[in-house]
Each structure stands twice: as C-alpha cells, then as structure tokens.
C-alpha cells in the first residue's frame, strides 16, 4: 500500500514539484497552502493521511503553529506522524523526522516510508497489547 501524504507547503513551485514527484512514486497526495489550509484539509478529507509533510515557514499559520493546533484540536489527526521540511535550524522535538532543505528526493521518499512503517508498527503493537489486556 502506498501512503497518503498531506503536504503543507506555501511555496507553489515546491509544493507542485513535490506533489508530482510523490505521485510518481505511487503516493496519494493532499495539498495545503499553509497551516490553516492544512487543518481545513484534515476536516474535509474522508480518510486521514498516513503522514504529514510540513513546511515550517508559512504565512497565516506557521508549521509550528499548525503542529500545536493539530495536537490541541484533532485527537485522531494528532497521532499522524509529521515530517518537518525546513530550510532553518528550527527543530520540533515532537516531529517524527526533520528534513533540511534542499534535500534529495530519495532521502524524502525513504523518510516517508520509514516513518509510516514505524508508525504502523507502533499502532499494531498497541492494538496487540490492548487485545491481550481484554
């Protein structure tokens, strides 16, 4: 199964290029222009994405503000792993991974698959523990 990616990036060229590249890898991509748009996208889509790719420096609502709002307002969505894409030295400790811009596409694809696989493994283990406690 190919992951569903929510890509939150304000730079149009970067967003469009990344979306095309991710789609060429078989991924389903939902696009958002900024943090506000990203929160609205999470409300509008039927199935939550497997991963969020999040730019940090955006207008209206930065990546950091999005991350904070996500944790406070979307209980289910707050469990989605977030990979930060940044050209700064800012680190979000709660993020599953941080990828510095500019990056190689292969590194991003690997990070997406590794992060989604690790997250799914943790979810399976938690379900198994819960079932054994019943």
Image: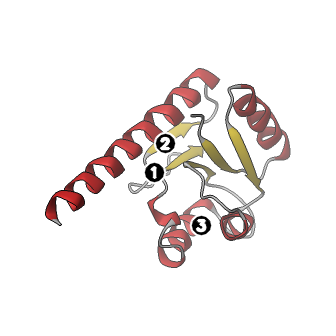
Give residue 94's position: percent from left, percent from top.
40, 57
Residue highlighted by disc 3? 66
Q: In this rendering, would 40 be left or right of 84?
A: right
Mark number, residue 91 = 1
Give residue 111's position: percent from left, percent from top.
50, 33
Please say if the residues under marks 1 and 2 sit with CB atoms less than 8 Å apart.
yes
Answer with the quarter of the image where residue 115 lies. Answer: top left
Please say if the residues under marks 2 and 3 sit with CB atoms less than 8 Å apart.
no
Q: CA distance from mark 1 to mark 2?
A: 7 Å
User: What crowding class fits label 1: few (fewer than 14 Cα within 10 Å), some (14-19), or many (20 or more)?
Assistant: some
Q: Earlier in the sequence, mark 1 or mark 3?
A: 3
Can I make out residue 87 in this image? no
Which one is in front, 14 or 101?
14
Which one is in front, 76 or 37?
76
Q: Residue at x 64, y 64 (%)?
A: 62
- Against 95, residue 107 (above or below) is above
Q: In this rendering, would 57 be left or right of 130?
A: right
């Amino acid at each position: 199964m190919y992951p569903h990616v929510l890509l939150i990036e304000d730079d149009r060229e970067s967003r469009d290029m990344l979306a095309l590249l991710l789609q060429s890898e078989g991924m389903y991509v939902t696009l958002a222009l900024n943090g506000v748009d990203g929160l609205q996208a999470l409300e509008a889509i039927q199935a939550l994405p497997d991963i969020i790719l999040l730019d940090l420096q955006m207008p209206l609502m930065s990546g950091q503000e999005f991350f904070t709002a996500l944790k406070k307002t979307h209980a289910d969505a707050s469990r989605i792993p977030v990979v930060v894409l940044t050209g700064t030295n800012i680190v979000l400790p709660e993020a599953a991974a941080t990828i510095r811009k500019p990056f190689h596409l292969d590194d991003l694809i690997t990070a997406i698959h590794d992060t989604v696989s690790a997250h799914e493994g943790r979810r399976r283990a938690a379900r198994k523990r819960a079932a054994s406690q019943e």
